Amino acid sequence: MDSSIPTAYVPQLMMEMLCVGKECQSAIMVRQTATYGAVILRLRRDDKWIEEMMFWLDRFKIQYVDKGKEPPKNFFCDDDDENICNRYNSFVKLTKELSDKAELVDYVKQNCVQRAVGKQGMISQLFLD
């Protein structure tokens, strides 16, 4: 099982750390599969990343939400400002780097993952079909 945090979850974890406050310096994520066990990962807080995230959220809100305007497909690189597009691409690259830097806390083998017990004390099926 991959010991990185999927890139799409970095904003969620960083926003949770922001909401908890400055004392929150990391977040734990448990990724579990139906057949391979679970991996416990830690993502460290990055205040510069959070500041940049707030810049992009604010920009999106002002340009599209406040105006009730639907954003184009590649909204931060569709305008003619090359500096903005480069800044956004750097932010996306940093997000990927943070996801790859997640620390492996522990790996839980499949047979150690507690599952719901069904009738007659048997472990319930993973899938219902």
Image (spheres, grey):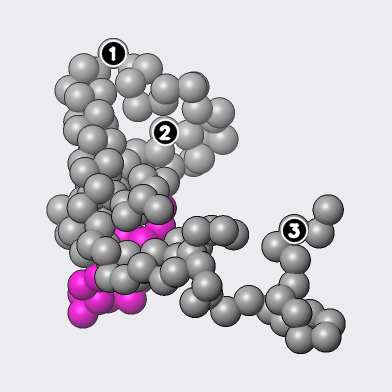
Residue 21 in percent (x, y) is at 27, 75
In depth, the one of 80 and 94 nearer the eye is 94
At horizontal 17% and vertical 59% (from top left) the residue drawn is: 47
Image coords of residue 71 (percent x, y):
50, 27
Asked if residue 53 lies in the magenta stretch, the reply is: no
**Could you say whether the residue bearing mark 1 is in a helix, strand or loop?**
loop
Residue beneath disc 3: 127
Q: Is residue 126 above or below residue 84?
A: below
- Mark 1 closeness class: few <14, some 14–19, many ≥20 residues within 10 Å: few
Q: Which label is found at residue 63? A: 2
Residue 54 position in % (x across, y down): 30, 51
Query: Mostly what secondary structure, the magenta segment?
Result: helix
Q: CA distance from mark 3 to mark 2?
A: 44 Å
Question: What range of the chain is rendered magenta?
Answer: 9-26
Q: Which residue is mark 1?
A: 80
Element under label 2?
Answer: helix
Label 3: element kind: loop
> Real-space Cα distance between discs 3 and 1?
50 Å
Name which residue type carries label 2. Gln
User: Residue 85: x and y, percent?
Assistant: 25, 23
Q: Is residue 27 above or below residue 10?
A: below
Q: Quadrant of residue 29?
A: bottom left
